[in-house]
Image (cartoon, rainbow, N blue to C red):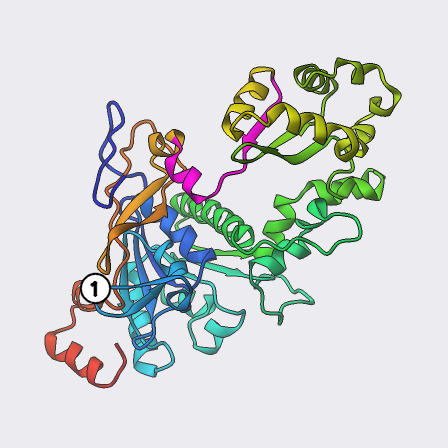
């Protein structure tokens, strides 16, 4: 799918479900920008507030490209800001804060993901916004939340911190080894974004019946506890502590094929029987060492890996998975970027959007919208905005500022 294209389902109703919803987002990096991009995909008008000189911090990420305005723009910004409008506004200036507050009544949602207390110090916290317009829904994402006290409230937090504290890394940590920290996934950010999206939709629905806004507050730590619910549950049920360590129960591991690796998950006895038969070792099902799920895990390296990898040696990882799945054994290839780009499922589901690059003939790829609606067309998706691209348009449209007003604000570095 390319920027600007529309994918039309049968009997599509062209109106987007969130058409008419306006979101004013003082946002940065990943968590909130990903949430508001999902809402933009569904029709919301997202106006992004950025500092006039350097924009939001996601613009400084790597890798990067050179945008139409000659600025270097980083990957974190590029993948999270499709179909948004950018307004450059210095919130550290009194005039910038005044403009922000004047914009508030024109929006349904005001959202921010700064360190707790930052917006309050600027005079733009939930109380100040509610005083301007009690119908506005105020949204916050932070490491440890704003509304409920936390002993970690003063800690800075990126996704790996929340992931570690939520228990994500222990189930994949090998005994005696450090936790396998994975930065690329950013689950701590994206999970928080998903819960934020749910909270916004719930608050909008609540406002329909009450006429009142409220504070939607999402903690990245809370979000990761929700995502790793197995970890505290195991402790509460007196499961052996080693069960929370990778490879201690069942067969959950990657195995080598001719062109890479594939991953299988075997947790049930009938699936183990099918696996053993498929790789030519039906006798395993009668041997004491394979009698328990813990026994399967213990036998991965000495017995199962050699047999399974010998069986898969002449197959691609996709062919091996096809054979396993045909027997009801859950398996999937361990994909690299090229595999995802070439996957027919990805193309059929419009899960990669091609965004033209001003500095290259090769388009940039951004993930698509995983939410599929039968009566709403996907797209059109607009490219990410240059810094402050829509400042004049938005301030003219919503605040009725004149050319002279805009020139004065620009001369004072407010916009």
In the displayed orientation, state which residue is furthest to the right. 288
* Side (left or right) of 400 relative to 298: left
Of residues 56 and 24, the one nearer the viewer is: 56
* Side (left or right) of 291 relative to 257: right
Image height of 315 relative to 273, above or below: below
Position in image of residue 386 (x %, y %): 25, 64
Any magenta on residue 22? Answer: no
Mark 1 packing: few (<14 Cα in 10 Å), some, or many (20+)?
few
Any magenta on residue 342? Answer: yes
**Is there any visible trace of residue 357 in the rendered image?**
yes
Position in image of residue 121 (x %, y %): 48, 78
**What residue is shown at x 24% (from left), y 37% (from top)?**
15
Quarter of the figure with residue 69: bottom left
**Is there any visible trace of residue 212 in the rendered image?**
no
Which portion, as a residue range, is magenta? Answer: 328-343
In the displayed orientation, state which residue is furthest to the left. 403
**What residue is shown at x 40% (from left), y 30% (from top)?**
345
**What residue is shown at x 11% (from left), y 79% (from top)?**
404
Q: Which residue is mark 1?
A: 68
Of residues 227 and 69, the one nearer the viewer is: 69
Quarter of the figure with residue 414: bottom left
Position in image of residue 201 (x %, y %): 43, 45
In the displayed orientation, state which residue is furthest to the bottom. 412
**What residue is shown at x 34% (from left), y 82% (from top)?**
94
Q: Quadrant of the C terminus?
A: bottom left
Q: Quadrant of the N terminus?
A: top left
């Amino acid at each position: 799918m390319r920027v600007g294209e529309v994918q039309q389902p049968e009997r599509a109703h062209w109106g987007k479900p969130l058409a008419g919803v306006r979101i004013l987002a003082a946002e940065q990096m990943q968590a909130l920008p990903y949430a508001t991009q999902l809402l933009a995909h569904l029709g919301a008008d997202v106006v992004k507030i950025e500092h006039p000189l350097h924009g939001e911090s996601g613009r400084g990420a790597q890798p990067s490209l050179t945008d139409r305005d000659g600025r270097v723009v980083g990957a974190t910004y590029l993948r999270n800001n499709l179909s948004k409008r950018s307004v450059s506004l210095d919130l550290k200036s009194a005039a910038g804060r005044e403009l922000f507050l004047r914009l508030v009544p024109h929006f349904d949602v005001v959202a921010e993901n700064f360190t707790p207390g930052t917006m309050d110090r600027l005079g733009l916290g939930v109380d100040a916004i509610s005083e301007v317009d009690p119908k506005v829904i105020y949204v916050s994402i932070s490491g440890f939340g704003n509304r409920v006290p936390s002993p970690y409230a003063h800690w800075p937090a990126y996704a790996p911190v929340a992931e570690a504290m939520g228990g994500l890394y222990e189930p994949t940590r090998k005994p005696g080894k450090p936790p396998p920290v994975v930065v690329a996934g950013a689950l701590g950010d994206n999970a928080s974004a998903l819960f934020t999206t749910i909270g916004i939709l719930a608050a909008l629905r609540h406002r329909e019946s009450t006429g009142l806004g409220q504070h939607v507050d999402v903690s990245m730590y809370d979000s990761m506890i929700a995502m790793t619910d197995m970890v505290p549950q195991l402790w509460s049920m007196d499961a052996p502590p080693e069960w929370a360590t990778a490879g201690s129960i069942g067969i959950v591991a990657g195995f080598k094929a001719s062109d890479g690796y594939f991953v299988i998950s075997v947790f049930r006895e009938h699936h183990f029987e099918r696996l053993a038969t498929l790789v030519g070792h039906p006798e395993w099902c009668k041997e004491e060492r394979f009698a328990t799920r813990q026994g399967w895990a213990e036998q991965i390296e000495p017995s199962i890996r050699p047999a399974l990898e010998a069986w898969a040696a002449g197959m691609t990882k996709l062919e091996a998975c096809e054979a396993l799945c045909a027997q009801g054994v859950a398996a999937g290839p361990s994909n690299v970027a090229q595999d995802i780009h070439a996957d027919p499922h990805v193309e059929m589901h419009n899960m990669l959007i091609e965004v033209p690059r001003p500095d290259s003939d090769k388009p940039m790829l951004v993930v698509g919208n995983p939410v599929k609606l039968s009566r709403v067309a996907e797209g059109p998706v607009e490219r990410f905005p240059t810094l402050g691209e829509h400042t004049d348009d938005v301030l003219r449209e919503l605040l009725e500022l004149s050319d002279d007003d805009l020139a004065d604000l620009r001369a004072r570095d407010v916009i």
